[in-house]
Amino acid sequence: MDNLSKIIDESINLELKVSKLYALFHKIFPDHANFWWKLTIEEKNHAALVLTGKEHFASIGTIPDNLLSRELEKLKVTNYELDFLINKFSTHPPSEEEAFDLAIQIEESAGELHFQSFMNKKGSAPIDKIFRQLNHGDKDHAERLKSYKKKYVTMKDEDASARESSHCSASR
């Protein structure tokens, strides 16, 4: 298997593992289940898009700029780390805030940033445009995670702190 095929396969695995992690968060956090489920499906769609393009890219010997990370070892390490986290969180779930922080970190990692950069790029080859059209709604995950966390998770923590503070001062 040539290096390009390995990069494509590891990139598909990355998208599927991120999807699996988000599916786990969907189960762990029922208050945010719909949000996590949407991201789960979008990550599976990313994997399907890359898989669909695999034959085409292999036949021309290249992939569009910024669609995938070209750093095979980083992809392998990230996939290994995702496997570890999925196993760990299956028995020891993270807090909501930890889950969101981790998801943001993942979405800002090299593998996911390449995909986002590609989706935001203007112009270029017809195959690039087709990929963008097929995936037009499944992007900006890091920004969506930050916005959702700020609105629903951080606010919830602040509300709990305020209630605790008022409870403490009322009992004096």
Image (cartoon, rainbow, N blue to C red):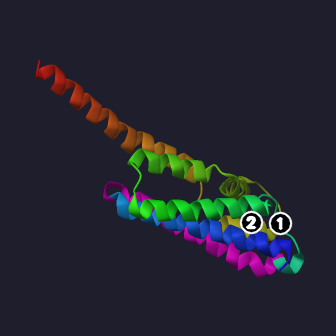
Figure check: 135 above or below 107:
below
Residue position marked by numbered label 1 in the rendering: 125
Q: Residue at x 81, y 65 (%)?
A: 64
Please identify the residue farthest to the top as the structure is shown: 172
Is 90 on the left-hand or right-hand side of 107? left
Main SS of the magenta part reads helix
> Quick one: label 2, few (<14), some, or many (20+) residues within 10 Å?
some
Residue type indicated by callout 1: Ala
Figure check: 8 above or below 104:
below
Q: Residue at x 36, y 55 (%)?
A: 32
Q: Which of 80 and 5 is in front in this view?
A: 80
Q: Which residue is drawn at 33% across and 37% down?
A: 157
Figure check: 145 above or below 20:
above
Whether residue 137 is visible to the viewer of this picture, yes or no, is: no
Q: In which quarter of the image is residue 136?
A: bottom right
Is 21 on the left-hand or right-hand side of 136? left
Q: Do the residues labelled 2 and 1 touch (CB within 8 Å)?
A: yes
Q: What stretch is highlighted in magenta?
A: 30-57
Quadrant assignment for the C terminus: top left
Residue 47 in picture, x, y percent from top left: 63, 71
Residue position marked by numbered label 2 in the rendering: 129
Quadrant assignment for the N terminus: bottom right
- Examine the structure image and report whether residue 32 is included in the region drawn in magenta: yes
Q: Is mark 1 on a helix, strand or loop?
A: loop
- Examine the structure image and report whether residue 86 is included in the region drawn in magenta: no
Residue 150 in picture, x, y percent from top left: 43, 39
